[in-house]
Image (cartoon, rainbow, N blue to C red):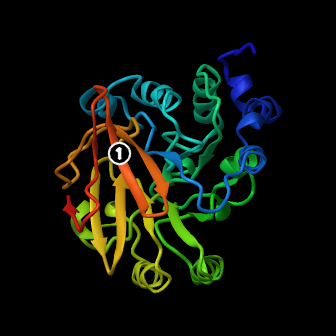
Amino acid sequence: MMFRRNEELFTDEENLRQLAAPWRTRVHLDRLQAAARKPGEAFEFAVLGDAEPGRFWIWRALFNRPGVFRRQLSRVQTQSVDFTIQLGDMVSCGKPRHYFDFFRQLHGLPIEKPYLTVIGNHDRSHPHGRSHSRVYRRLFGRATNYFFDYGGVRFIVLDSSRQRLTQAQIRWLAAVCRGPRRKVVLTHMPPVLLGLWGPAGHRMGGFHQGAHQFTDLMAELAVERVYMGHVHAFGVQDYKGVRYVLTGGGGSPLFPSGARDRFHHFLTVSVGPDGLRERVHLLDGSSFQIPAGKVLIA
């Protein structure tokens, strides 16, 4: 496919939609269903955090390393994973020209495994203010809250990109999490009351509205894991019997955020009858396993 980098192409919706068509959520969910694992069968998947390169040149110059997202996504393809979920903030600002650059990166990589996305606040029209998600939804699909079943596990993708959860979302989440099946939730922002990853109550550290209901519901429904990005760091916290894993090191700038463990990384997650086990893969090629017992890493 030929790419013409000019403003006409950026604003040509049909061109952009054709470029995005192979990456629509429905396409990759259908691919997963076609090669589904049986309940109880062991498998692995990857989780990759924030990827946007930074909105301003000074941020990119001070806190970023060019090409990290491409390097990490390429390494994911060498892992024995069945699919990848990217936790949002794919672009610096949810405008057509930014999505053009993002999809150009994807087309330049040998991505052979299903690739699913979570919407982040940067993927909206304005990252930290009044915004809409129309461009994201036109490109990936209308649903920003969705779920799928794979290998006996229900994966729930939850839209926290507006820095809140609504009552309608809480009701939907409760409905799709009911039942005895294993459950994993993936969302962009952490609930802000987990103050390890930014000052508690500070909007940049996560979402406040609905945070208590969310964490109470996760505990009530015995959700096995919650994966989150937004804060460009790594951390693990067990809260009310649920493990929350922060993995925001997909390639975005490593700002001073209040979190101690700030490094680029991605996760591979092994799913077996005895639970989930995460391995953290660092940019230098090394890796380490997250302990299975109760941990508190900030």
Q: Give above or below for 83 relative to 181.
A: above
Most foreground residue, 244 or 204: 244
Q: Give above or below for 62 relative to 256.
A: above
- Residue 295 in the image, given as x and y percentages of width and height: 22, 64
Specify whether 30 is left or right of 240: right
- Residue 125 in the image, given as x and y percentages of width and height: 58, 50
Q: Amino acid at mark 1?
A: Arg
- Residue that sits furthest to the right in the current view: 14
Element at badge 1? strand
Q: Is residue 247 visible?
A: yes
For label 1, the crowd category at 10 Å Cα-Cα, with few meaning under 14, some 14 to 19 and many 20 or more, is some
Which residue is labeled 1 in the image?
279
Q: Quadrant of residue 199?
A: bottom left
Specify whether 147 is left or right of 213: right
- Residue 58 in the image, given as x and y percentages of width and height: 30, 31
The residue shown at (58%, 31%) is 102
The residue shown at (65%, 76%) is 176
